[in-house]
Amino acid sequence: MDLSRFHRAINLIAVDYVNRAVDANFTKLSSNLASLVGNPGNLQISQAFKDHLEIFRQSLAESELNSADGELLETLTNQGLKKFVGDALFKQIKVVLDQNQLTPNLAAAEIVKLHSETSQKMALVSSIDDAFSALEVDYWRLPDGETEMLLNLPIATETKTLEDLAKEAKDWHQICRSIAETFDAEQNRITIRTVASGSILLYLAAAPAFIFGIAKCLKGVNQILAEVIKLKALYAQLVDSKLPDSLLKEFDNHHAGKASTDLEKLASSLVEEYYLGGDDGRKNELKNSLSMSLKRLSQKLATGTTVTLRLAKPPKPKIEDGAEPSNEQVTVLKEIESLEKIQIEVDACTASLDYKEHSQELIAALPAPAHEDPEK
């Protein structure tokens, strides 16, 4: 991950811990449990415990980390921090209390243990944030209203050359070019925003129309790849059932080349629906170009590349009751509405299967991408 993005994620986690008053709420919860241990039948103490538990729950429920995405979610997950924030932290608290309802002394000990583990983790997060700030490490976030595509290209150490990297970049240029022409009438350029380590991470700045287009393409390609995997599994079942070779061959022949045909159909349908150019000749050329791009994209996904799409919606403008929104507010509201529609497509384009487990059968079933003239 790019270090400036990691800095922002760490800072948000550290700030949330303070804003949620997690340390103070844990201390109060432990104090209430200790009082319960000494006065198990005191209804006033029992109610005070319940009241504070609800305050703690509400505070964690309001954490913005509950809806984390992008680098923030990646940091929470990869650094093992997700269970120490927001709703996930309260879930741990609730489990402890539910498992020790009749033994508040055991519940108190477990809560102290969880408090200690949480505070230790967050002390490390705070230390990292302080160190990054002292060292003036950049702090970066995707600006409101902007969108980007992250390509994670898996490369084992010292297995690729600069020539391989150049070919990879050329492949993605051709994939993006035909998708951009299909979906973005303004033909906005797709530019490199950041290059980071961790295999090879390419953060590409792109127009919302392109992000919508790549989401539609990914959704279609993922459906085709999932169908390939299903057919391969079905074929294996037929082999295990000892069907005659003639029937197995007929099944295999019937589905041979299906992925290629389906990708060509997907390209054609996308161009027909979204291309706004008036040149019919170019429209037909674009169908062929997009078809090659989708075949190339399917190969990339099958061999381990992951594509992540991100957009940053601006905050909704505050409009007083009974007041009409200003022209500027109307513009922002329309932008938010547009990005929300794109977000629906982005959410729908996630692969339902892990392609790493099926890479060999996918590569065998997919067409090898044809050469495309980069100047055409």
Image (spheres, rainbow, N blue to C red):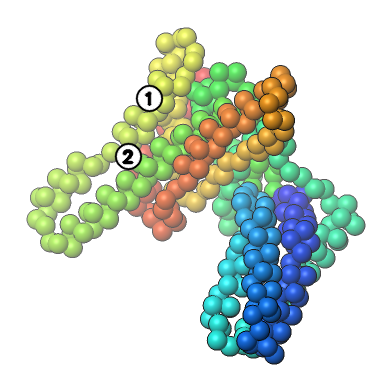
Q: Residue at x 42, y 10 (%)?
A: 280
Few, some or many residues within 10 Å of mark 1 (<14, 14–19, 20+): some
- Residue 266: quadrant of the picture: top left
Which residue was labeled with disc 1? 268
- Residue 79: quadrant of the picture: bottom right
> Amino acid type of disc 2?
Ala
Depth check: give the residue in front, 269 or 142. Answer: 142
Q: Is residue 167 visible?
A: no
Looking at the image, is 248 positioned above or below residue 339? below
Q: Residue at x 32, y 47 (%)?
A: 228
> Amino acid type of disc 1?
Ser
Depth check: give the residue in front, 57 or 10. Answer: 57
Q: Residue at x 11, y 50 (%)?
A: 247
> x%, y% of residue 145?
67, 32
Depth check: give the residue in front, 225 or 323. Answer: 323
Q: Is residue 102 visible?
A: yes
- Please name which of the two marks, 1 or 2, marks the residue nearer to the observer: 1
Query: CA gap, disc 1 to disc 2?
Result: 14 Å
Secondary element under disc 1, as helix, strand or loop, is helix
Which residue was labeled with disc 2? 259
Secondary element under disc 2, as helix, strand or loop, is helix
Residue lying furthest right: 134
Few, some or many residues within 10 Å of mark 2 (<14, 14–19, 20+): many
Judge left or right: residue 141 versus residue 292.
right
> x%, y% of residue 54?
64, 66
